[in-house]
Image (tube, grey):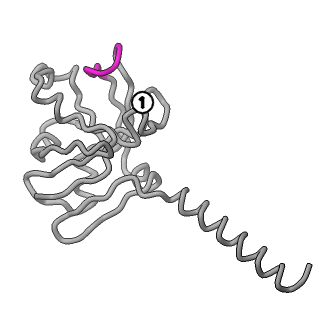
Amino acid sequence: MTQFSRRIFLTAALLFLSAGLAWAEEVLLTIETGQGIETYDRARLEALPQVELTTHTTVTDGPQHFTGPLMRDLLADAGVTSDTVLALALNDYEIDLPVEDFTRYDVIAALTMNGEAMSPRDKGPIWIVYPRDAHRELQDINFDYRWVWQLTRIEAK
């Protein structure tokens, strides 16, 4: 192998490794705090305290088991202090959410459903999940709109 061939091989290998690292550290969620931008990959999300929640949804059969950080912990970690946030999804769905929901209820940013990481095909990688079964008022259709699946961005308002 010539020196030129070795350089091409090493360059290609470094590019391949860099692409692999970028994939492993893929940003799943961006939070615009009003003072700056925080990004979260899976490892940073999983480093937050994890909560388990079993509840029914309007789009699945039977109770489902979810895990992920509490939304209030996630927003606190990012430094969000506003009363309302805009949640945006990969499928272009967006909705204003009152931050009071996250202090009043144990709403989670679900990373897994029934023990499996969720892909965009399965409403992931992040799904805002309310403890629907624990509070009768959360069974109202107005709260159903707040279950943002394929969550990709949160903006403080």
Q: Residue at x 32, y 50 (%)?
A: 152
Q: Which residue corresponds to mark 1? A: 113
| Region in magenta | 55-62
Q: Position of residue 23 (x, y in %)?
A: 54, 57
Whether residue 7 sits left or right of residue 148 in the image: it is: right
Q: Identify which amino acid the numbered label 1 is placed on.
A: Met
Which of the 4 quarters of the picture holds residue 112?
top left
Q: Position of residue 24 (x, y in %)?
A: 55, 56
Q: Quadrant of the C terminus?
A: bottom left
Question: Where is residue 54 shown, x and y percent of the image?
Answer: 33, 24
Residue farthest to the bottom?
3
Foreground residue among 37 and 11: 11
Q: Is residue 9 above or below residue 112?
A: below
Residue placed furthest toward the top: 62
Corner quadrant of residue 146: top left
- Determine if the magenta segment contains residue 60: yes
> Residue 37: where, in percent of width, then height?
27, 67
Q: Quadrant of the N terminus?
A: bottom right
Magenta segment includes 119: no
Residue 76 sits in quarter: bottom left
Mark 1 element type: strand
Side (left or right) of 16 relative to 8: left
In the displayed structure, 105 sits above or below 75; it is above
Magenta span: predominant SS is loop
Q: Residue at x 48, y 30 (%)?
A: 115
Q: Which sits in the foreground, 72 or 153?
A: 153
Q: Residues within 10 Å of mark 1 (few under 14, many from 20)?
A: many
